[in-house]
Image (tube, rainbow, N blue to C red):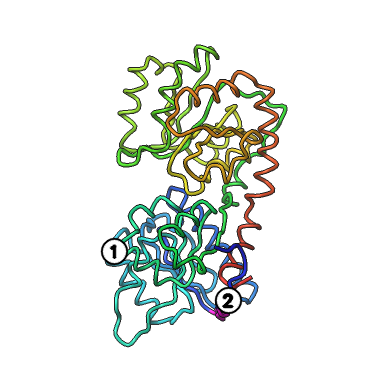
Amino acid sequence: MHSGVSNLPDLRLDSVLLALTGLEIDGGIACVSRCIARALDERCRAGALARVDRVLLLEDPRHAAAPPVAGRQWLACGSQPRFAWQLWRAFRRGRHDLVLFDLVGLARAALLPLPSLPPPRTAIFVHGIELATARAGSRARALRAARTILANSDFTARSVQAAFPELSERLRVVPLCIDPDREARWVAPDPRSPREAAALVVGRMWAEERGKGHDDLLAAWPAVTARVPGAKLWIVGEGDDRPRLEARARDLGVSGDVHFHGRVSDEELGRLYRRASVFAMPSRQEGFGLVYAEAMWHALPCIGSTSDAAGHVIRDGETGVLVPYGDVPAIASALCGLLGQPERALRMGAAARRHAVDRFGYPRFRRDLLAALDLG
């Protein structure tokens, strides 16, 4: 696997077709896609690319992103057959040098045969969790057919390499960055501002995907409040599993100390980041964990697990604490060690802020992306 310039033969790119889940939708994938679209638009303005077109699967036409600066944009309105048809129609018209997908699942559309057209040269951004369903079938064929695999972390790259050793030379690591538009809406943390004895977790709550650590945080909370009276747990996000988690908080007798904020605006999320004392998401399923970088930008120390890519974002003992996934006593101890020691939390938060600004800014992401696509 590589981070930087490809060893493959040079390919002159004049036009790119972006096949994306969406730009103005919720979720970390959309944040990544916005940064990709932004970087390629900047290359068009600089004259390094002639054209960038986009096909968006889930974009709401009422709140759609602005079209690219040099190209067209099509909206599939949630229809996968329409997405595939729009993708091939755009490729037939533009004969793009590269088609870039933001998810493995979307890349299956590139496998559809179209008479008289050669298959497109593709690049696929891989985020980690989708690999569980990509080891066989059309997703696996799409990965094997891709010219370049962009991995969001070394952890994800190693997962791809383990499942598809033959793709090692096509792997390029492009660590993620904080969305610059979101960053512009946030207020930089003031080290003099008081923080509350609260831990914050930000993540979706889906019954089919219970690996982000919500249950373990709730299970740890009685021990936390026994040692840090009045400590609060703030949960941001939505999903069909929220009612069950709310009931679990009641059953554990901690519902008075746990607040479910639901989905919040970027501005409100920034305020919660600035008010909390620690960010805690002891997950097992992060291929990167963009929320860790966002929390650290707000000078929050982070608690993550040793079972996923958290260790590639959090520096254990310096910008946060890593614990074994599912180890409730270890999670409670880590929380008490930060909530119960405000000065320690502030020191680690300051280190986290420096690390986030240095490592997870958009300019670095743009350089890595363009180099991986031979556009640098």
The boundaries of the magenta stretch are: 9-14
Secondary element at image label 2: loop
Mark linked to residue 137? 1
* Residue found 47% across the figure and 16% down from its top: 223
Mark linked to residue 165? none
Q: Earlier in the sequence, mark 1 or mark 2?
A: 2
Q: Is residue 39 above or below residue 248?
A: below
Residue of label 2? 49
Task: Depth check: give the residue in front, 114 or 351.
Answer: 351
Q: Is residue 285 magenta?
A: no
Q: Find residue 62 and report its image quarter.
A: bottom left
Q: Dividing the image into 4 quarters, which one contains the N terminus?
A: bottom right
* Residue found 57% across the figure and 37% down from its top: 270
Secondary element at image label 1: helix
Q: Is residue 245 left or right of residue 324?
A: left
- Label 1 packing within 10 angstroms: few (<14), some (14-19), many (20+): few
The amino acid type, in three-letter code, at marker 2 is: Leu
Locate residue 210, reporting x and y percent.
Answer: 35, 37
* Residue found 57% across the figure and 28% down from its top: 276
The amino acid type, in three-letter code, at marker 1 is: Gly
